[in-house]
Amino acid sequence: MSIADNIKQLRDIYNVTQRELAEVAGVTENAVSKWENGYAEPRMGAIERMAACYGLSKMNIIEDAGMTLIDPITKKPRSPLPKGAIFPRRSKPAFAPKLGRVHAGEPQDPEVMDGPMVELSESIAEAHPRAYFLEVEGDCMDKVYPEGCLILVDPDREPANGSIAAVSIDGADYVMRRLLRTSNTMVLAPESFNPEHEDIVITASGGRTVELAGTVVWYQPAREMS
């Protein structure tokens, strides 16, 4: 499901016209029509205004199938699994290496370690054979991945628009953020309970380089790492 489909579904769930959505986004009705027909994509400012108005996250509008996470009846995020649900036990063990720590805050050099092999779901291991774990430091992404948990990064999966990625900035500093792209801008967005965290904006003319280290595909809470 593309951004165009997400915007169509947003209007359907919240029962708003193209004109009403245009007023929320600060654009023309024709612009909304172009979004829905795939002729153009909304700028980040318009995405943020729509998300704020309807109580959504930016990923609901940008990420593939983002609006399917919203219950059309309650108009709130769905709960994908019952609270406290756990994976069933596997028939045989599977492991991935723990290679270091990644900061969920200001970019900084990663802390590399010769960590232990960490057990994980067999199905996850089979789907991501070269994936590795990183321990999360900082609270920049604590709405999604709390500090101290382990994230599983797949270096073979190119981060899609709206996915959470581990990235290297200017060849050295590493950070974990949600990756949002427009035609000439890359935004590394926090998802934190701490309002002090801000977007890292990379423009084509800004002279900074970004290397995508991989996509976060799974995580393991700290309480399950003993």
Image: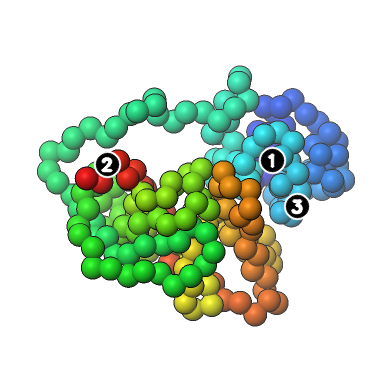
Label annotation for residue 45: 3
Q: Residues within 10 Å of mark 1 (few under 14, many from 20)?
A: some
Which is more N-terminal, label 3 or label 2?
3
Q: Residue furthest left?
A: 92
Kind of element beneath mark 3 = helix
Does the rendering let one see residue 144? yes
Asked if residue 182 lies left or right of residue 59, the reply is: right
Nearest the viewer among 134 and 9 is 134
Q: Is residue 209 above or below residue 103?
A: below
Q: How many marks?
A: 3
Q: Position of residue 116 (x, y in %)?
A: 20, 59
Q: Quadrant of the N terminus?
A: top right
Q: Report the Cα–Cα distance between label 1 and label 3.
A: 10 Å
Asked if residue 144 lies left or right of residue 130, the reply is: right
Q: Position of residue 221 (x, y in %)?
A: 34, 43
Mark in the foreground, 2 or 3: 2
Q: Which residue corresponds to the image point at 18% horizontal and 35% vertical from the top-left?
A: 89
Which residue bears the numbered disc 2? 224
Q: Residues within 10 Å of mark 3 (few under 14, many from 20)?
A: few
Nearest the viewer among 62 and 54 is 54
Q: Position of residue 65 (x, y in %)?
A: 55, 40
Q: Quadrant of the C terminus?
A: top left
Going by the numbered disc 3, the residue's amino acid type is Gly
Which is more N-terminal, label 3 or label 1?
3
Kind of element beneath mark 2 = helix
Q: Report the Cα–Cα distance between label 1 and label 2.
A: 33 Å
Q: Which residue corresponds to the image point at 67% horizontal and 70% vertical from the top-left?
A: 203
